[in-house]
């Protein structure tokens, strides 16, 4: 493992074996096909598919398909919204424009979501190889991912942007590996990285956290040529800002505030209140404007920005008045993120096993491939931070679930080598 003058690990390990691209592609295609067929089969088994449970994402997408406006996410009309980042509702809205908002449109929506989820499964193998893991580890992770459906509606119905965010996060790791191999602060790649980062913000603002963590990790590499590095950072930031700027201008014009997303106050108030519920499995959403018409009508009167400020102040006041309860809820959020609750006991145990094996696999990875552990560790530290504050939902962990599958596969592969002789890689 190479180090720079600061002692930071910055380069991936040498990948001794020369993998066969054709065989990798074939394996990825097979994994994609199996994962896609399984998910489509589940779609076909869903009852009442033409009347799905409408969420904010589908409401906004349907409104854009009808009127060209990103608006009305809740149970009654409330006007223009920044409750969601714009990329996924626009993609979903395009599907609705082409195929309608009835059964046909929702079926194509599900196909789109299944394809994104299957693509995540297919890309696990090449990502593992790029990180310096062996073929068996990548195949184990990819194989498990075929049947691993941790957020049913998110994967099978295509209701949320999490599968797209997962692909973005995987590509972020790929870019980090390529950057670490060259370690060149070119102004051209700064602009490209900035455009990529800005796009990620418009897909899911929570991706700002791992992007910031990865960018922070470049600081030791830029110290020797700090003037060039500062210029590189400035160009990257400027490029990202230019990508996000039209969305900020739109929100300033129609909402009166240049926000990326407007719903933090709402989510904070749902997480910290007298109900003291840490999971969406209960009635935590009873006061959500998606379900509560009175709250939705109040938003129409005061405006989305003012409403979220009200809810944020309400939550902060509750936290100040109930510090012990707030601390307990925060701890529950952390536990639920890593050990998700579920109404089905078997599924709850299964998810706990995934987390435990991933943590053990990460320890093995840290001793054998410090660069891969470094990248995955950055994601584990940064990505969940916002979700430790708010209540648990099954879709929140989905974008980084593939890292847990990879680490679990590291452990399974290591256990497997105890019962068979080590074989030469064939890919």
Image (tube, helix red, strand yellow):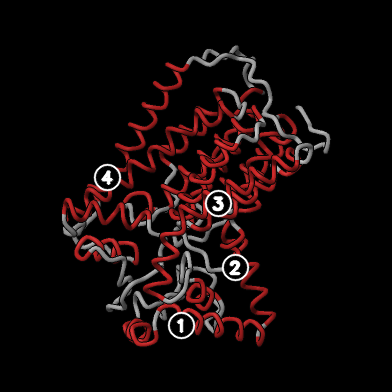
Marks 3/1: CA distance?
Answer: 29 Å
Q: Position of residue 228 (x, y in %)?
A: 70, 40
Q: Position of residue 226 (x, y in %)?
A: 75, 42
* Total tally of numbered discs in the picture: 4
Find numbered disc 1 in the image and state the secondary structure of the residue it sits on: helix
> Looking at the rendered structure, which numbered label has been put on residue 40?
none
364 and 199: which one is in front? 199
Task: Specify the quadrant of the image occupied by residue 296.
Answer: bottom left
Instruction: Tell me which residue sits at (41%, 69%) in the image.
Output: 251
Find numbered disc 2 in the image and state the secondary structure of the residue it sits on: helix
Marks 3/4: CA distance?
Answer: 36 Å
Q: Nearer the viewer, mark 3 or mark 4?
A: 3
Label 2, residues with CA under 10 Å away: few <14, some 14-19, many ≥20: many
Instruction: Tell me which residue sits at (37%, 54%) in the image.
Output: 87
> Looking at the rendered structure, which numbered label has been put on residue 389?
2
Q: Tell me the quadrant of the picture where the N terminus can be found.
A: top right
Find numbered disc 3 in the image and state the secondary structure of the residue it sits on: helix
> Looking at the rendered structure, which numbered label has been put on residue 238?
3
Instruction: Tell me which residue sits at (69%, 42%) in the image.
Output: 229
- Mark sitting earlier along the chain (2/4): 4
Find numbered disc 4 in the image and state the secondary structure of the residue it sits on: helix
Q: Are marks 3 and 2 in contact (CB under 8 Å)?
A: no
Q: Which residue is mark 1?
A: 306
Marks 3/2: CA distance?
Answer: 29 Å
Q: Position of residue 196 (x, y in %)?
A: 49, 44
Q: Which residue is mark 4?
A: 111
């Amino acid at each position: 493992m190479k180090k720079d003058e600061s002692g930071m690990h910055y380069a991936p390990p040498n990948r001794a074996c020369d993998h066969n691209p054709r065989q990798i592609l074939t394996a990825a295609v097979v994994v994609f096909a199996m994962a896609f067929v399984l998910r489509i089969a589940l779609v076909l088994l869903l009852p009442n598919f033409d009347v799905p449970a409408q969420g904010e994402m589908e409401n906004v997408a349907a409104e854009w398909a009808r009127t060209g406006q990103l608006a009305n996410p809740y149970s009654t009309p409330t006007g223009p919204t920044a409750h969601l980042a714009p990329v996924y509702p626009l993609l979903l809205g395009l599907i609705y424009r082409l195929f309608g908002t009835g059964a046909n449109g929702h079926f194509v929506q599900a196909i789109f979501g299944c394809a994104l989820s299957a693509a995540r499964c297919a890309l696990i193998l090449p990502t593992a190889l790029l990180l310096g893991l062996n073929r068996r580890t990548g195949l184990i992770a990819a194989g498990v991912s075929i049947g691993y459906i941790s957020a049913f509606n998110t994967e099978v119905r295509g209701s949320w942007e999490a599968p797209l965010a997962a692909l973005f996060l995987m590509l972020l790791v790929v870019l980090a590996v390529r950057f670490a191999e060259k370690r060149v602060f070119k102004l051209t790649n700064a602009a490209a990285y900035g455009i990529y980062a800005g796009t990620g913000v418009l897909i899911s603002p929570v991706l700002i956290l791992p992007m910031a963590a990865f960018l922070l990790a470049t600081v030791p590499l830029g110290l020797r040529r700090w003037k060039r590095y500062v210029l590189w950072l400035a160009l990257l930031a400027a490029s990202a800002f230019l990508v996000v700027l039209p969305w900020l201008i739109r929100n300033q014009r129609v909402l009166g505030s240049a926000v990326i997303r407007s719903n933090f106050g709402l989510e904070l108030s749902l997480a910290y209140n007298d109900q003291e519920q840490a999971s969406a499995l209960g009635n935590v959403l009873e006061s959500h404007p998606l379900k509560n018409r009175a709250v939705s009508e109040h938003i129409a009167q005061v405006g989305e920005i003012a409403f979220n400020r009200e809810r944020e102040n309400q939550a902060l006041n509750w936290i100040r008045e109930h510090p012990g309860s707030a601390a307990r809820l925060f701890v529950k959020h952390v536990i639920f993120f890593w050990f998700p609750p579920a109404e089905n006991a078997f599924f709850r145990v299964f998810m706990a096993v995934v987390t435990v094996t991933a943590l053990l696999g990460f320890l093995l990875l840290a001793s054998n491939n410090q660069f891969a552990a470094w990248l995955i560790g950055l994601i584990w530290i940064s990505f969940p931070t916002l979700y430790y504050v708010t209540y648990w939902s099954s879709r929140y962990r989905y974008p980084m679930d593939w890292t847990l599958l990879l680490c679990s596969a590291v452990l399974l592969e290591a256990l497997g080598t105890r019962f068979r002789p080590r074989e030469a890689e064939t890919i």
